[in-house]
Image (cartoon, rainbow, N blue to C red):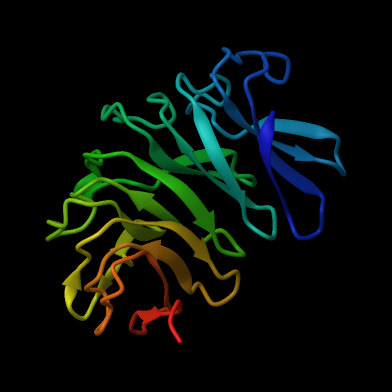
Amino acid sequence: SGEPDVSDDGDRVVFTSATTELWPTANGQPQVYVRTLSSNTTVLASVAPDGLSAGDGASAAPALARDGGVVAFASAAGNLSSGDSNGVSDIFSYDMASATVTRRSVAPGGADANGASFAPAINADGSVIAFTSEASNLVMGDNSGVPDVFTASGATIARVSEGLLGEGDGASGEPAIAADTDAVVFASAAGNLVADDDNGVSDVFIRPPGDALHRLSRN
């Protein structure tokens, strides 16, 4: 077991485990679980639509909303949502109130992403998830050929790692999202996201909602 995260009030803890002792259909694949201390209960977040079957592929990197209501995670399982046939890792969310799983890394029209998605981060109330993806069909006009950082808000996906000079010419990843402002911070080797980025190494950027991209790792 590992990869723990905790809600602000300390009542809910999310973690991954490959044990078969926590859920009746656990199959030896790493799964995502949420433990609620006040009720002494554990639920399976990487669960199929039947509410019982465990994911048939490895799940990882869980991130828990500060209020403990939503879990974001990456999974290579193909049975967590209908129509998932891309055979690669996708981003999912599990809603504690409704006990439902939603695939978040989907292309327009609900099509499969054509590349792997991973490293989710989540805002305070679980309404926005940031993640890294190698897919080129999550947004229109993605011709960069490198991993990008995206946000999923409801059914809307937006690419974060693009600047006024166009899409990034280097890989972007490691997103983090501010709990209350939804500003996204990420690392990128791209040299064309902002003007005068000629250091030839990875930098750290921030994109506040509705604002331009700013490079933080500079004097």
Q: Quadrant of the N terminus?
A: top right
Between 118 and 79, the one lying in front of the other is: 118
Query: Which of the 4 image quarters holds residue 37?
Result: top right
The count of marks equals 0
Q: Is residue 20 above or below residue 106?
A: above
The residue depicted at 46 percent of the width and 87 percent of the height is: 219
| Residue 138 appears in the figure | yes
Q: Is residue 131 above or below residue 198?
A: above
Query: Which of the 4 image quarters holds residue 213?
Result: bottom left
Q: x%, y% of residue 218?
A: 43, 82
Between 99 and 210, the one lying in front of the other is: 210
| Residue 128 appears in the figure | no
Query: Which of the 4 image quarters holds residue 168?
Result: bottom left
The residue depicted at 73 percent of the width and 15 percent of the height is: 21
The residue depicted at 48 percent of the width and 50 percent of the height is: 120
Q: x%, y% of residue 3?
A: 65, 39
Q: x%, y% of residue 49?
A: 47, 28
Q: Is residue 120 above or below residue 177?
A: above
Q: x%, y% of residue 38?
A: 87, 44
